Amino acid sequence: MNRAGFKTPLPGPRARELIARDAAVVSPSYPRDYPFVMAHGRGAEVWDVDGNRFLDFAAGIAVCATGHSHPDVVRAVTQAAERFLHISSDFWHESQIRLAERIDELAPISGPVMSFFAQSGTESVEAALKLARHVTGRPRFIGFLGGFHGRTMGSLAFTASKYTQQKGFFPTMPGVTHVPYPNSYRPLFAEADAGRATLRYIEEILFSSNVPANEVAAILIEPIQGEGGYIVPPDGFLAGLRALCDRHGILLIFDEVQSGVGRTGRMFACEHWGVEPDIMTLAKGLGSGLPIGIVAARKSIMERWPRGAHGNTYGGNPLCCAAALATLELVQGGYCDNAARVGAYFMDRLRALADKHAVIGEVRGKGLMIGMELVSDRLTKEPAKALCEAVITRAFHNGLLLLSCGASTVRFMPPLLIGEADVDEAVSILDASLDEAGACGNA
């Protein structure tokens, strides 16, 4: 019997059966890392189809913000389903209007805010790009290396966290130029301030030699980079980017799909630095598991595209709006503060773990958006990709669900309701998993 108390090796017999059935009928393109087949979940705990219990620190890629099947969210969705399941965006319904009003209240954008409704993060990004082009009349964009914004052709043009996401799909949307995301742990420029160096590169090199600033519609950026490694930008960088956009009449789009809705201990990650976007994209944790995306923008921007310029069939679905309203109530009602408090405790525990395991190069993050970068050598900072994969696999076999990001970073994005006892359990499993992965010679 292993550390988690599983009585049979993973995957169990029922999981193996379902995985075999899946292989015959489901696309192989999904990036699955280990054989977890879910049966049900509550809060931060999940059970597989063989009855094994796991602690979930992946949360459906930061989607289950309020935990699995939170009773308030389930109740809101059930009540909405009893009224009606769908009405297209050709018409109106109250929960969509109420949700737009809540976003207007909460969005870190001064003045009135309007919302466009979608089903996912990538669709929200697509809408934001179309909006930016429409209102500015400009054709170009700037994105960031390491960024992830989705897999449809417009958002894919910005996605640069792994080349496999782009391989075989060129050409994507034209007009996107990538610049380095300021990474203080792995700086690409010689300048000490990685944020200042990136800003200088855009202003003094890119705009003078390759991209006319007056042709750039918008700069799209994650306030904290997700798939690229859970990279927290240096203080002052986002403010500097805001100033650069203002100088050149460029719109600033914050992709808060992964970092928003309380994930970082603030309702939106950009609030850590007090910087306002012109346009913001949301999804993932907004619906606690139901598919919903939103583009929030200054009213002065959103109201400039006319009737029929953009739309969709399922945007503003009543079940998804009900889930989002319940989610925002819970997050604002205490889960956001919990993410800040428990996240700080978690970071302390992980940094203490780094004193024992020399392969932990850096622990970084905000709230419950935390990355632990693994390296083969702390001096050279050589990424330990094989070790990272092995640790995540061993954690699964020990009862903890995790995902990776960047070159060799274990990321932690548990439900926002977790407590310190959950963190203690996760750190204990992680400690054992690091030992086991190291003993297998993964470095």
Image: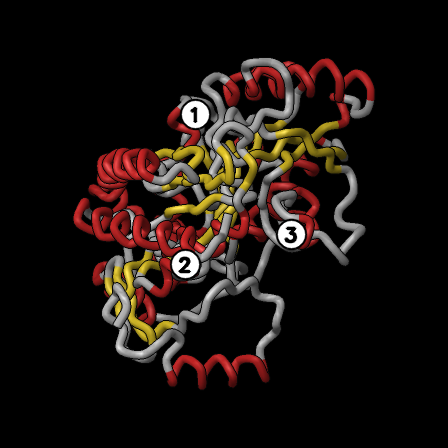
Residue 81 against residue 291 in the figure, above or below? below
Which amino acid type is shown beneath numbered disc 3? Gly
Q: Within 10 angstroms of label 3, few (less than 14), some, or many (20 or more) residues? A: few
Residue 308 shows which numbered tag? 3
Q: Which residue is mark 2?
A: 60
At 35% from the left and 51% from the top, the residue drawn is: 435
Q: Within 10 angstroms of label 1, few (less than 14), some, or many (20 or more) residues? A: few
- The earlier-in-sequence mark between 3 and 1 is 1
The image shows residue 69 at horizontal and vertical percentages of 27, 64
The image shows residue 107 at horizontal and vertical percentages of 40, 34
Q: Within 10 angstroms of label 2, few (less than 14), some, or many (20 or more) residues? A: many
Disc 2 vs disc 3: which is toward the camera? 2
Q: Are marks 3 and 1 in contact (CB under 8 Å)?
A: no
Q: Secondary structure at mark 2?
A: helix
243 or 412, which lies in front?
412
Tell me which corner region of the image, top left, top right, bottom left or bottom right, holds residue 75: bottom left
Q: Which residue is mark 1?
A: 110
161 or 222, which lies in front?
161
Q: Secondary structure at mark 1?
A: loop
